[in-house]
Amino acid sequence: MSTSDVVDPSTDLPSNITPEQHATLGIRLHERGELHRSSYHLRKAAHGSDVTGMILYGLALRHGWGLRVNATEAFMWLNMAASWVAADNDLERSHSIVGPHQERGRNICGGLNKESKAQLGLAMYELGVSYLNSWGVAKDEYMAMTCFELGAQFEDPDAMYELAALWCRNGPGRKKDLHKAAALYREAADKGVNTVGNCWIYKEKYLRPRNTCDDPDRAIAAKKKSLFSSRKKPSNG
């Protein structure tokens, strides 16, 4: 049975409930362990263009919560949720995403309300997880980091945590940067993410502002600059 063939397991509900109400019912039923009924309501919410419904229905498809696993369709719904929030808030995702080779801090979330920021942050985090684990889409660590970068800017703590983990090693389009990783881990911890085992992020060297001595490439460049600038030009006489 395809996901579109799921029938309504509830017979005592009005036929005119809103997509948002479907999403609320889906969440409550999921919390009670009634996954099949939950998936029905999440699907109705998603098809009714409720962003929360899109995200949760996508996760239900990914993990098989009450219906058959379909990772490709799951990715489609997560991507649609992010696009929907972006369009609804006049954000052009293709021009707003900050690549992993760029510095964080570019302000792209001004004007978004708290709910929209949370929805877009969660959607981008889940898209990043999809790219990182090849769930419904080809594995692409660069795109995963791009999604986590944007999710972190929308203050999603899980996106911050995953982004920090990627900065702990070299990868496509980036060099290992423990200062960035430590800062992101601390930010995620401040928002409630468990960072047990990462006590190194509170070492003095990662708390103080970075200097050239902490970056071998910068240190070498600074040394060369100092060396050449100190050389005297040959005299003409």
Image (cartoon, rainbow, N blue to C red):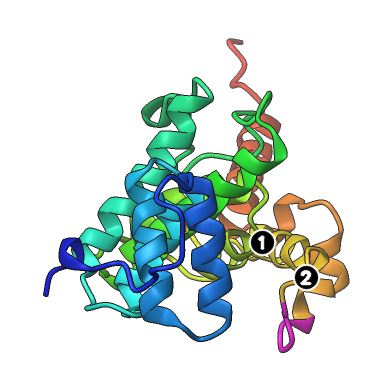
- Residue at 76% x, 80% y is 200
Which is nearer the eye, 48 or 143?
48
Quadrant of the frame with the C terminus: top right
Q: Position of residue 109 (x, y in %)?
A: 63, 31
Left or right of 76 in this view: 12? right
Q: Position of residue 51 (x, y in %)?
A: 47, 45
Whichever of callouts 1 and 2 sits on the residue coming sooner in the sequence is 1
The secondary structure type at the circle numbered 2 is: loop
Task: Using the image, determine if residue 89 lies above or below residue 121.
Answer: above
- Residue corresponding to mark 1: 157
Which is nearer the eye, 233 or 78?
78
Q: Position of residue 201 (x, y in %)?
A: 77, 73
Q: Main secondary structure of the magenta part?
A: loop
Where residue 231 sits, quadrant-wise, is top right
The secondary structure type at the circle numbered 1 is: helix
- Residue corresponding to mark 2: 192
Q: Which residues are magenta?
A: 194-199
* Residue type, label 2: Gly
Instruction: Judge the density around disc 1: few (<14), some (14-19), many (≥20) Cα neighbours within 10 Å.
Output: many
Q: Which residue is most to the top?
A: 237
Task: Using the image, determine if residue 126 lies above or below residue 146.
Answer: below
Quadrant of the frame with the N terminus: bottom left
Task: Say the numbered circle drawn on residue 230.
Answer: none
Tell me if label 1 and label 2 are in contact, CB under 8 Å: yes
- Residue at 40% x, 74% y is 37
- Residue at 71% x, 51% y is 212
Which is nearer the eye, 37 or 94?
37
Whether residue 171 appears in this view of the structure is no
